[in-house]
Amino acid sequence: MLARLVKGALNQRLLVVVIAIVVCAFGIRASMKLSVDAFPDVTNVQVQVATEALGRSPEEIERFVTIPLEIAMTGLPGLVEMRSLNKSGLSIITLVFTDQTDVYFARQLVTER
């Protein structure tokens, strides 16, 4: 079986060369269409909520701003993790969603709350 295939390929050299050129052309065309990123995006889907309350201590920011916002954000669909940072006059809440969640959809959910 294999000997017959080799014998046929040697007899039809021109056909084998044409098929090889066509396969190479399709391969080159496919590689040109392939999108390649130098650094693929490996970050998770995050939305940050930054709130400014000038003149307040970090404890007041946490009690009057951060905790009510965290309670309001609890139960968002696809929410995996919630982190918060309180500084003098500033509250930053980072909401991490599942990888399947669209970042614009996650932003919309947070904005609606």
Image (cartoon, helix red, strand yellow):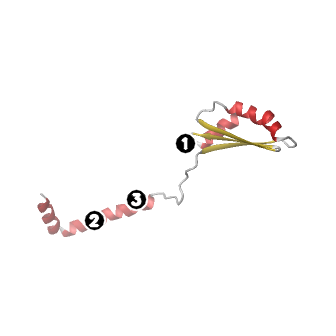
Tag 2–tag 1 contact (CB < 8 Å): no
Q: Which label number is shown at residue 99?
A: 1
The x and y percentages for residue 30 are 40, 59
Q: Residue at x 53, y 60 (%)?
A: 38
Q: Residue at x 58, y 35 (%)?
A: 78
Residue identifier under label 2 = 20
Q: Quadrant of residue 2?
A: bottom left
The N terminus, quarter of image = bottom left
Find the distance from the CA under tag 3 to the CA under tag 2.
15 Å
Q: Nearer the viewer, residue 52 or 26?
A: 52
Q: Which label number is shown at residue 1?
A: none
Q: Which label number is shown at residue 30?
A: 3
Local SS, label 1:
loop
Q: Earlier in the sequence, mark 3 or mark 2?
A: 2
Mark 1, mark 3: which one is toward the viewer?
A: 1
Q: Nearer the viewer, residue 64 or 30?
A: 64
The amino acid beneath tag 2 is Ala
Find the distance from the CA under tag 2 to the CA under tag 1.
42 Å
Q: Earlier in the sequence, mark 2 or mark 1?
A: 2
Find the distance from the CA under tag 1 to the CA under tag 3.
28 Å
The x and y percentages for residue 23 are 31, 62
The image shows residue 94, relative to residue 42, as above or below, that is: above
